[in-house]
Amino acid sequence: MHTKFLAQTLNIIDPDVTGNVTPSLSISGRSNFNTIADLVNAVLHFLFPLALFIAFVYFVWAGWDLIQSMGNPEGMKKAQAKITNAVLGLILLGISYWMAQIVVRIFF
């Protein structure tokens, strides 16, 4: 069985006919990244969902601050600023994803 683990291939020996498992494990250093674009694409596929999760947490945090402000103008202003920053972050994330897809389609 071949399992990809980061930039390496992990080979695990399957059990033999008698059911005994041979504790043999080999890791080869070959990479599936042939170009810089492959590496960037792999990193982006990891970072974009992480950024979306962080934006979601920031929205929840801002909502909590808005609820906790209980009408206090200063607290509401801070919470609204957090919401504005989260929306701007999501817009920038969407634009950067869109631009990365355009670059990949044009050049690769």
Image (tube, rainbow, N blue to C red):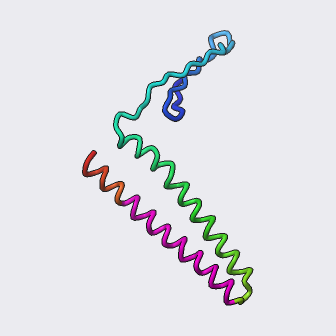
Q: Write the residue at 49% across / 32% down.
A: 7
Q: Write the residue at 36% across / 55% down.
A: 100
Residue 43, position in %: x, y? 46, 46
Residue 31, position in %: x, y? 43, 30
The quadrant in which residue 42 appears is: top left
Furthest residue toward top: 18
Furthest residue toward front: 74
Number of numbered discs on residues: 0
The quadrant in which residue 101 appears is: bottom left
Furthest residue toward left: 106
Q: Is residue 79 on the magenta stretch?
A: yes
Pick whichever, 54 or 16, lies toward us. 54
Q: Quadrant of the C terminus?
A: top left
Residue 5, position in %: x, y? 54, 33
The vertical placement of 16 against 69, above or below, is above
By secondary structure, the bulk of the magenta-drawn segment is best described as helix
Pick whichever, 23 or 16, lies toward us. 23
Q: Quadrant of the N terminus?
A: top right
Left or right for 77, reference 32: right
Q: Is residue 81 on the magenta stretch?
A: yes
Left or right for 94, reference 15: left
Residue 39, position in %: x, y? 41, 41
Q: Write the residue at 66% across / 76% down.
A: 63
Chain part drawn in magenta: 73-98
Q: Write the residue at 36% across / 40% down.
A: 36
